C-alpha cells in the first residue's frame, strides 16, 4: 500500500510503501504482542484481556499499547513493524524502494504516522490470534478434569 505524506512540512510529498507481514510472521508477531501486553496477568484472565487488547490493537491507540510495554518486549516488535515500511526515494523511478533509515525523516511526526498506518495495516488478524488463548485455557481445564475422579469407585467387582 502506498502512503504519501500529505501534511505540511519537510516530509510533504514523500512516498512510502507499507506491506503486510507474511502469515506465519504475523501470527507469531500477534502472539508476541498479546503476550507482551498481558504479561503479569493471571493465566485465567489472559483470554479476556487478550480479547480486549485485540480490540484496542485494531483501534487508533493500538500502537500506544505496544509502546507502553517493557522495551525489552516491544523493541523487537517495533523493528518488525518498521521492516514493513519502505520508501520510494526517487519519484522519477516509482518501482524502486528501499528500507527506511533515520535520514528519511525530517519530521518525527511523519515516522509516527507511518508506524500507526503500518500497525493498523498489520493488525486485522488480532481477533484470530486472541481466539487461540481461550482455547488454551479450555484445553488446560479439560486436562485437569480428565485426571480428577468424578465419582467414587464402584464397590462391585
Image (tube, rainbow, N blue to C red):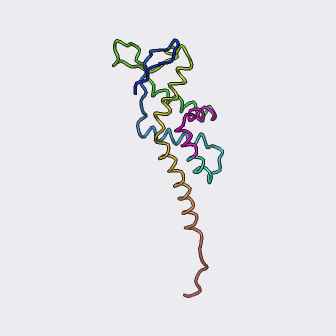
Is residue 138 within the magenta segment? no
Residue 145: percent from left, percent from top? 57, 66
What secondary structure characterizes most of the magenta part? helix
Is residue 55 within the magenta segment? yes
Question: Magenta segment range?
Answer: 52-70
Farthest bottom residue? 156
Residue 139: percent from left, percent from top? 53, 59
Residue 110: percent from left, percent from top? 52, 20
Quadrant location of the C terminus? bottom right
Residue drawn at point x = 58 percent, y = 45 percent: 52
Residue drawn at point x = 53 percent, y = 21 percent: 111
Quadrant location of the N terminus? top left
Residue drawn at point x = 54 percent, y = 31 percent: 76
Look at the picture and state if 28 lies above or below 89.
Answer: below
Residue drawn at point x = 66 percent, y = 45 percent: 40
Look at the picture and state if 147 lies above or below 124.
Answer: below
Residue 75: percent from left, percent from top? 57, 30
Q: How many marks?
A: 0
Answer with left or right where residue 59 lies relative to residue 70.
Answer: left
Look at the picture and state if 106 lies above or below 140.
Answer: above
Q: Nearer the viewer, residue 42 or 107?
A: 107
Amino acid at each position: 500500500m502506498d502512503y504519501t505524506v500529505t501534511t505540511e512540512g519537510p516530509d510533504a510529498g514523500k512516498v512510502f510503501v507499507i506491506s503486510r507481514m507474511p502469515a506465519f510472521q504475523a501470527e507469531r508477531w500477534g502472539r508476541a504482542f498479546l503476550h507482551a501486553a498481558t504479561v503479569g496477568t493471571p493465566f485465567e484472565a489472559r483470554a479476556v484481556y487478550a480479547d480486549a487488547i485485540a480490540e484496542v490493537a485494531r483501534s487508533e491507540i493500538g500502537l500506544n499499547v505496544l509502546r507502553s510495554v517493557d522495551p525489552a518486549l516491544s523493541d523487537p516488535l517495533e523493528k518488525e513493524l518498521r521492516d514493513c515500511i519502505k520508501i520510494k526515494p526517487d519519484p522519477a523511478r516509482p518501482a524502486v524502494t528501499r528500507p527506511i533509515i533515520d535520514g528519511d525523516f525530517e519530521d518525527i511526526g511523519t515516522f509516527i504516522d507511518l508506524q500507526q498506518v503500518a500497525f493498523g495495516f498489520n493488525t486485522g488478524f488480532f481477533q484470530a490470534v486472541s481466539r487461540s488463548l481461550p482455547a488454551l485455557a479450555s484445553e488446560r481445564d479439560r486436562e485437569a478434569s480428565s485426571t480428577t475422579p468424578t465419582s467414587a469407585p464402584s464397590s462391585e467387582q
